[in-house]
Amino acid sequence: MHFSVGYDGSIYDCDFNQMLEMTAQPVDHISAFDYEAFISRKIMTNNHCFGCTAGGGSSCGGEIIEV
């Protein structure tokens, strides 16, 4: 499981979402972290995600499930 945590404790699904301030939902802050809720969350996506899903993004390689 990979995710990003901001300096203020906000949780993001990836570095790109962090730069766009798109916090993870429903668990958006480390103080409210709940493992079961976090692993069953819907990953926040938008147009910037096409770079990763095409394999041209950061180190994530576009995987959104654990293989």
Image (tube, helix red, strand yellow):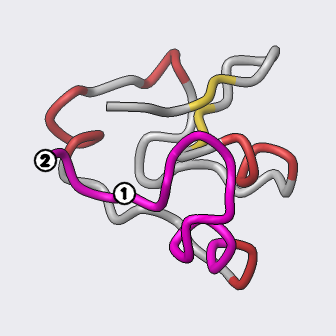
Above or below: residue 5 compared with residue 41: above
State the mark number for residue 17. Answer: none
Residue at position x 56%, y 76% in the image:
54
Residue at 22% x, 27% y is 35
Residue 4 percent location from the top left of the image: 61, 29
What label sits on residue 63 in the rendered view?
A: 1
Q: Main secondary structure of the magenta part?
A: loop
Mark 1 near mark 2, Cβ–Cβ under 8 Å?
yes
Span of residues in magenta = 49-67
Q: Is residue 16 left or right of residue 61?
A: right
Q: Residues within 10 Å of mark 1 (few under 14, many from 20)?
A: few
Q: Is residue 9 above or below residue 21?
A: above
Find the residue positioned furthest to the bottom. 47
Q: Quadrant of residue 29?
A: top right
Q: Is residue 54 magenta?
A: yes
Furthest residue in direction right, as rendered: 19
- Disc 2 residue crowd, few under 14, some 14–19, many 20+, Cα 10 Å: few
| Of residues 37 and 56, the one drawn nearer to the viewer in this rendering | 56
Q: Which residue is mark 2?
A: 67
Residue 55 shown in magenta: yes
Q: Amino acid at mark 2?
A: Val
Which SS class for mark 2? loop
Tell me: 28 left or right of 63.
Answer: right
Does 56 appear above or below 14? below
User: Which amino acid, mark 1?
Assistant: Glu
Q: What is the x, y in percent for residue 18?
A: 76, 44
The residue positioned 71% from the left and 41% from the top of the image is 15
